[in-house]
Image: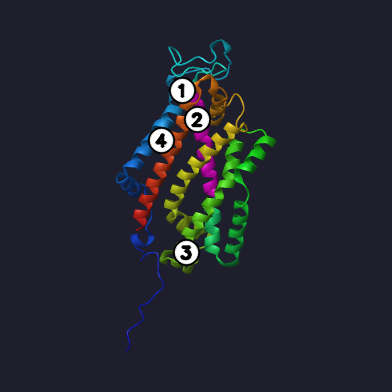
Amino acid sequence: MTAPDVTAAPSLEAETPAERNPVSIRSVLRGLRRHPLGLAGGLLLLLIAGFCFLGPLFYQTNQTDVDLVNAALPPGPGYPLGTDTNGFDVLGRLMSGGQVSLQIGLLAALFATTIGTVYGAVAGLAGGVVDGFMMRLVDVMLSIPFLFFVLILSARFHADALSLSLVIGGFSWLVSARLVRGEVLTLRVREFVLAAKLMGASRRRIILTHLIPNALGVIIVNITFQVADAVLVVAALGFLGFGLTYPTADWGSQLASGVTYISADYWWLIYPVGGCIILTVLALNLLADALRDAVGRRAD
């Protein structure tokens, strides 16, 4: 009598942690410990966020009413970083502008990543003609000059923090879609995905339960880069005069206002806000690089 065939379809119960290889917060933190620059970037980002969101609780200023009597004052008693040409305290202006810039950056990144993750996961799992059509649509949209289109929308419609976040996120999801799609193409042939298909799981369940959680490392890294890109876009729009309008302030509009008076040597209107933009983007990029290395090491 021959022995029974023990070959069976892969099952979720037989799946090992190494097969799934999920990215957990604890594993990412362990990877960050080996990356001192990433830790420095994360600490710097926390300090900037604390400065912008907690600073106004301890250093309260009037950022609404124009005070021409105290306009363009250099740093001194009562005004640590001086005042701008409208009499607004520059230190308080940096805090309020940082709040808006970081909020827009985070909201735009979350919006873009959500759309791009779902779109890329559907395209990668579907494959074939559907995948080809969806990716060609992404290629067409990537050919549109992003900043030029945002400038047109900002000039045509009144820009506020929410609308600007949605516009930036509405174009930034294309990169997320490509990244997630590439990750899904490698995950869809893994044993736990095949087992889920054999057990009759729907495509929606496979995407939400198996594919997206296992692509979380790529998604987290992409969010960090997206925030940095959005902060730069907001600064560029404000610098060109197409950003947020009074009384809302952002770092880009502050920098543009300071550059106007560069010949008058109003350095306190330029260097502090320029330093905030540079340090924020630098911190986000250092953290993103560290997260990418940590996730890559985990995947290996």
Quick check: marks 4 and 1 in contact, CB under 8 Å?
no
Range drawn in magenta: 92-114
Q: How is the image coloured?
A: rainbow
Determine whether the residue tagged by mark 3 lies in a helix, strand or loop. loop
Label 2 vs 1, first from the N-terminus: 1
Q: CA distance from mark 3 to mark 2?
A: 40 Å
Query: Quadrant of the image for the C terminus?
Result: bottom left
Determine whether the residue tagged by mark 4 lies in a helix, strand or loop. helix
Determine whether the residue tagged by mark 2 lies in a helix, strand or loop. helix
Label 3 vs 2, first from the N-terminus: 2
Residue 267 vs residue 294, the one in the foreground = 267
Q: Amino acid at mark 2?
A: Gln
Q: Amino acid at mark 3?
A: Arg
Q: Which residue is mark 1?
A: 56
Magenta span has 144? no
Q: Which residue is mark 2?
A: 99
Label 3 environment density (alpha carbons within 10 Å; few <14, some 14–19, many ≥20): many
Q: Which residue is mark 3?
A: 188
Quick check: marks 4 and 3 in contact, CB under 8 Å?
no
Could you tell me what secondary structure mostly forms the magenta stretch?
A: helix
